[in-house]
Image (tube, grey):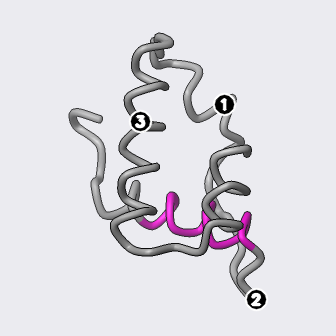
Amino acid sequence: FQGKDRAQLIQREWEFTANFLGAPGVTYTGRPMRTAHAQHTIFGGHFERRLQILRETLADHQVPAAVQQAWIDH
């Protein structure tokens, strides 16, 4: 994410997640995921590491198990 606007990245991630989880009135305004990530080389290890960080963060914040599972499954 070098050279990218960190605040904008965080905002798009929040929109994407809130929209996915069904938050009322939240619209994702970013590009489609495939388009947004097409210019980046993402290896399996990158994805697995991000998934592990997500699991740890959800657990640390005591997100309900059903929400954690829905998010991980997505």
Identify the residue shown where x is 46% and y is 19%.
40
Query: Which amino acid is tagged 1?
Result: Thr
| Mark nearer the N terminus (2 vs 3) | 2
Q: Are marks 1 and 2 in contact (CB under 8 Å)?
A: no
Front-most of residues 56 and 30:
56
Separation (CA) of disc 2 from disc 3: 26 Å
User: Which mark, by number, is residue 50?
Assistant: 3
Picture layout, residue 73 above or below residue 15: above
Question: For mark 2, does the 10 Å Cα neighbourhood hold few (<14), some (14 to 19), or many (20 or more) residues?
Answer: few
Identify the residue shown where x is 40% and y is 21%.
46
**Which SS type dominates the magenta stretch?**
helix
User: Which mark, by number, is residue 35?
Assistant: 1
Picture layout, residue 17 above or below residue 34: below
Horizontal and vertical percent for residue 3? 22, 37
Q: Is residue 32 left or right of residue 13?
A: right
Query: Which amino acid is tagged 2?
Result: Pro
The part of the image, by quadrant, that contains residue 32 is top right
Question: For mark 3, does the 10 Å Cα neighbourhood hold few (<14), some (14 to 19), or many (20 or more) residues?
Answer: few
User: Which mark, by number, is residue 71?
Assistant: none
| Mark nearer the N terminus (3 vs 1) | 1
Stretch in magenta: 11-21
Question: For mark 1, does the 10 Å Cα neighbourhood hold few (<14), some (14 to 19), or many (20 or more) residues?
Answer: few
Query: Which amino acid is tagged 3?
Result: Arg
Front-most of residues 19 and 57:
57
Element marked by disc 2: loop
Q: Which residue is mark 2?
A: 24
Separation (CA) of disc 1 from disc 2: 25 Å
Horizontal and vertical percent for residue 37? 55, 28
Q: Are marks 2 and 3 in contact (CB under 8 Å)?
A: no
